[in-house]
Amino acid sequence: MTLRSVGGEPFITDQSNHILDAAFGKALRPIEIAGAIDAIPGVMEHGLFLSEIDTVVVGRGETVEVHLRKQAPGSLR
């Protein structure tokens, strides 16, 4: 984990919070990971938007990848 900083000083949000950046690689069980992070005392929020996002667009140099959420059979968007 890395404390997010700007100009060598810790970045402070508009609500006076610090941000820790963490890279875990591919999340194999994101719902369980989100629950575990939520259970840590003092954690305000995480960046796992598991029910809010249907599409992710990733730019890699000259390439653009579009990833769509897999829908359960019979579900409506």
Image (cartoon, grey):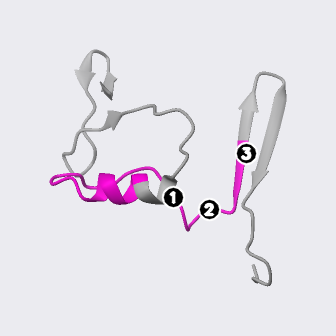
Q: Amino acid at mark 1?
A: Phe
Local SS, label 3: strand
Confirm or deny contact between disc 2 and disc 1 (CB under 8 A).
Answer: yes
Confirm or deny contact between disc 3 and disc 1 (CB under 8 A).
Answer: no
For mark 3, what is the residue?
57
Q: Amino acid at mark 2?
A: Ile
For the magenta stretch, what is the residue range? 33-57
Q: Earlier in the sequence, mark 3 or mark 1?
A: 1
Local SS, label 2: loop
* Label 3 to label 1: alpha-carbon separation: 14 Å
Report which quarter residue 22 is drawn in. top left
Q: For this rendering, which residue is in front, 66 or 24?
A: 24
Question: Where's residue 33, x and y in %?
Answer: 41, 52
Local SS, label 1: loop
Left/right of residue 17 with respect to residue 75 in the rendered view: left
Residue 49 - label:
1
Magenta run includes residue 46: yes
* Label 2 to label 1: alpha-carbon separation: 6 Å
For mark 2, what is the residue?
53
